[in-house]
Image (cartoon, rainbow, N blue to C red):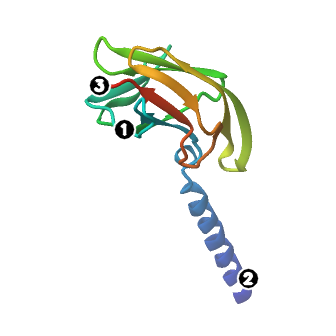
Amino acid sequence: MRKAIVGFVLCIVLIAWIGISCSNTDCVLTNTSYTNFVFYNERGQAVSLSGTISVTAAGTDSVLINQESNPKMFQLPLSYTNTEDTFIIHYTEKMVDSVFVKHANIPYFISMECGTGMYHYLEEVRSTDNAIDSIQIIDPEVTYDAKENIKIYYTAGL
């Protein structure tokens, strides 16, 4: 009888431990891959932009970056359902650029708790040219790594 009670208590403790360990997983934060955009001047030197920028996603009311001061780069998520995203970079109220990113979505299995995640493969990138001189894909594989994916070249004076 005593062995049965000890076994029962151990089972309850094991089930509680598994339940606690599973509920502490934050799938959303740990399973989002971001595209890394880094800023350069026309000579190919990494720079930070003067002033503040905001970035929004076209067709939504989502503000992805809100008035970041003197940024050297930014990270943006890509759509899981679409194969092209449009981001609008707001330098001032009247000065904006749009960045268009075509990509393939690559689902992968994470775990039973978190389901699947999404990697992306960058196929094409282009932009308007109000402040941006040119834009270029450096590493097309968008994963959890904090590596540079896209270079944005700015004209002098921004």
Q: Which residue is mark 2?
A: 4
Q: Which residue is depicted at the point 50% across and 23% down?
A: 134
- Cα distance between the residues tagged 2 and 3: 77 Å
x, y (%) of residue 93?
28, 14
- Are the two marked residues, 1 and 3, in contact with CB atoms closer than 8 angstroms? no
Tell me the tag on residue 47: 1
Q: Amino acid at mark 2?
A: Ala
x, y (%) of residue 113?
66, 50
Q: Quadrant of the N terminus?
A: bottom right
- Cα distance between the residues tagged 2 and 1: 68 Å
Q: Which residue is outermost to the front?
A: 43
* Residue 101 in sight from this viewpoint: no
Q: Amino acid at mark 3?
A: Gly
Camera-nearest residue between 104 and 50: 50
Q: Which residue is depicted at the point 33% across and 14% down?
A: 95
Tell me the tag on residue 157: 3
x, y (%) of residue 136?
56, 29
x, y (%) of residue 151?
51, 33
Q: Which residue is depicted at the point 66% across and 78% down?
A: 10
Camera-nearest residue between 103 and 61: 103
Considering only vertical position in the picture, is 9 above or below 72?
below
**Which is more N-terminal, label 3 or label 2?**
2
